[in-house]
């Protein structure tokens, strides 16, 4: 027997690679991926506050990795769209309207 990769202590038979097959037989459908993502989001709802620094860090890393300063119009148009959506929600009087306006 020989030692595995980089002295990891995993013993492999001489002349043989690992027997694990990592290839997918077929790709999962979009519906299966969306269901899995929705289930994961639902499972993480009680920990949403813990994900805020992760999102902030990812946003900062993406911004600092850019070669040039991004244009302002996409952010401005997104803010206008969110403002309109929050206004419509508040006008219709949904239960979450106050939260949407406060978040805006």
Image (tube, rainbow, N blue to C red):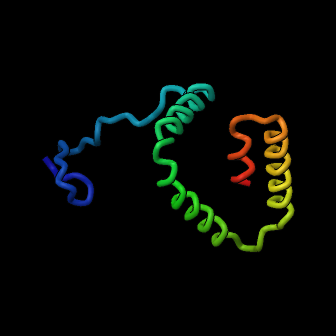
Picture coordinates of residue 97, whole percent (x, y): 74, 41
The residue that appears at 47% across and 37% down in the rendered structure is 43
Side of 25 relative to 61 (left or right): left
65 w.r.t. 13: above or below: below
Q: Residue furthest left?
A: 1
Q: Quadrant of the C terminus?
A: bottom right
Residue in the foreground of this view, choosing between 64 and 87 = 87
- Which picture quadrant has residue 71? bottom right
47 w.r.t. 69: above or below: above
Side of 44 relative to 79 (left or right): left
The residue that appears at 50% across and 53% down in the rendered structure is 49
Picture coordinates of residue 103, whole percent (x, y): 69, 53
92 w.r.t. 56: above or below: above
The residue that appears at 19% across and 45% down in the rendered structure is 12
Residue in the foreground of this view, choosing between 24 and 49 = 49
Picture coordinates of residue 9, whole percent (x, y): 17, 54
């Amino acid at each position: 027997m020989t030692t595995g990769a980089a002295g990891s202590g995993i013993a492999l038979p001489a002349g043989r690679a690992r027997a694990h097959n990592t290839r997918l037989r077929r790709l999962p459908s979009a519906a299966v991926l969306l269901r899995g993502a929705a289930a994961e989001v639902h499972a993480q709802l009680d920990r949403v506050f813990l994900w805020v620094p992760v999102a902030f860090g990812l946003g900062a890393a993406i911004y600092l990795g850019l070669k040039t300063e991004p244009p302002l119009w996409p952010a401005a148009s997104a803010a206008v769209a969110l403002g309109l959506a929050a206004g419509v929600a508040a006008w219709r009087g949904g239960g979450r309207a106050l939260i949407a306006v406060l978040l805006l």
